[in-house]
Amino acid sequence: MGHLDSTHLMGKLISGNHLESISLHKRDHLTGLGNRLLLDEILENWQPNSPEVSSLAVIMIDLDRFKKVIDALGHSAGDTLLKLVAQRIMSVVQEPDTVVRMGGDVFVVAHPIGLKSMSTEWVAKRIVELMHRPFLVDGQQVNISASIGIAALNHGTDTITDLLKHAEFALYKAKGTHQGAIRLFEPELAFQAMNRYSLEIDLRRALVLKEFILLYQPQVNMTDGSLQGFEALIRWQNPARGLISPLDFIPLTEDTGEIHAIGEWILHTACKEAMSWDGNFSVGVNVSPIQFESEGIVNIVSSVLATTGLPPERLELEITEGVLIKDFANVLKQLWALKSMGVGIAMDDFGTGYSSLSYLNSFPFSKIKIDQSFVRGESYPKSRALLQAIISLGGSLDIVTIAEGVETQDQYDQLAADGCLGAQGYLISVPMPTTSIRDFISDFKKTHVSD
Ligand code: C2E
Ligand code: MG
Ligand code: MG
């Protein structure tokens, strides 16, 4: 029988991580720490055994950028890093804390709170600090960081069975804040997680239930006032929730991976509907960075063009700078493949990212869409210099510039004076369903016939 017969656990935690005392099946073989089974056992058997120990906290640690390390240096370097991380965490904790690796790059410290123990926040902060320091892996310096979620009994968590789940909610929230963030669980987080969960469930059914629609917003050529094309913008119409903005559900579909199926539907629908319009107008389709991860996008676009019959020149994919931050070479390869098919590529929300401008040279975009923050609002006077710089950059690289979010005639005139080539925004029209496009086009022709 191993040393850790559960009767030994009654009333106390396993002290520290005495490797020799952890039976093999409760040990994480890579790091020598405990594993999930050990943690389960500790939680199941935990009860405060003395006036000095009043509560139990669970500190859940998740490494930021771990996948990048594996991508760059390989799995064996990843393993080495995990061992070093385990050692650093162990150097922070004291008996009777226990450290386990839950799997992947997630670690948990079970931390009894008592008179003599260090505060939970202190332990968490110290771990974050140590993770920020460079690691030396196979002779290479590796920089990572860690985010932490904490849940503690009697601090918003009433039962031991909820501790891990609550720490996970807090961790999820921390991850959404910034790298190296520490977040304590509070009941509001459980509420948010429940909401998110129910949204996820509804979203999973939305495609089958045909709850998505595409609206189209016109783009005009400012040099001659002609209509250029339309950008497809998705909406989710849920009977119970009403009309939901893409900003509120696209990120969720990116997390769950559903963006692949939905993205394919968007492409197919936009191309099919564009075929029904009266004229050779282009159709802009927003593509999420996630859709470039699987390398399937090129095949999807080519099969959608084949089945709908839309000429490739009429399709313009809108990507954001986020696409180019990830796996630059791989994304570039796909963009070139799309371009060689004749499809246009627009850089969306230009000026909001923080990537270098050099990518403008690595890939010949057909269009730069200047973000609306430069065009509208109080910041406009200050933004004007930047706006002019972007327009002239586009001019010298021979890339069409179009301003987004044009709402007033003043903005339009200003942009035209600055040499911007295209405009899109409420001034021209709000996004409309495909069924309204026929009327829009004929009205537009009537009012612009003398231009
Ligand atoms: P985006 O691609 O930059 O789209 C422009 C957004 O600005 C749209 O918001 C549009 O309705 C809005 N807009 C247009 N003109 C004006 C204006 O004059 N003033 C103001 N204040 N806003 C204007 P929307 O439709 O809510 O879409 C938001 C974002 O969601 C889009 O930004 C795009 O990033 C994403 N998105 C929309 N549709 C799709 C889609 O089909 N697939 C993917 N992956 N993302 C999409
Ligand atoms: Mg767009
Ligand atoms: Mg945009």
Image (tube, rainbow, N blue to C red):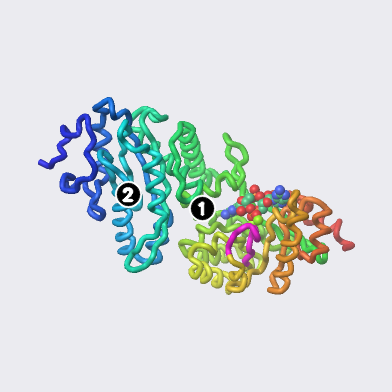
Residue 82 to residue 8: above or below: below
Indicate the amino acid at tag 2.
Ile
Which residue occupies 36% across, 30% down? 153
Ligand 3's image quarter is bottom right
**Residue, far right:** 450
Mark 1 secondary-structure assignment: helix
Indicate the amino acid at tag 1.
Ile
Ligand 1 within 8 A of label 1's CB?
yes
Where does the image place residue 158, in percent across and percent down from the top left?
Answer: 37, 27
User: Can residue 244 be seen at all in this image of the molecule?
Assistant: yes
Where does the image place residue 16, in percent across and percent down from the top left?
Answer: 24, 42
User: Can residue 436 be seen at all in this image of the molecule?
Assistant: no
Instruction: Estimate how packed mark 1 is, as few (under 14), some (14 to 19) or many (20 or more) residues with alpha carbons within 10 Å.
Output: many
Magenta region includes residue 417 = no
Q: Which residues are magenta?
A: 345-355
Count the numbered circles shown. Answer: 2
Question: Which quadrant holds the C terminus?
Answer: bottom right
Q: Which mark is residue 89?
A: 2
Which residue occupies 55% across, 59% down? 322
Residues 205 and 245: in front is 245
Q: Which quadrant holds residue 270?
A: bottom right
Instruction: Estimate how packed mark 2 is, as few (under 14), some (14 to 19) or many (20 or more) residues with alpha carbons within 10 Å.
Output: many
Q: Which residue is mark 1?
A: 259
Residue 154 to residue 231: above or below: above
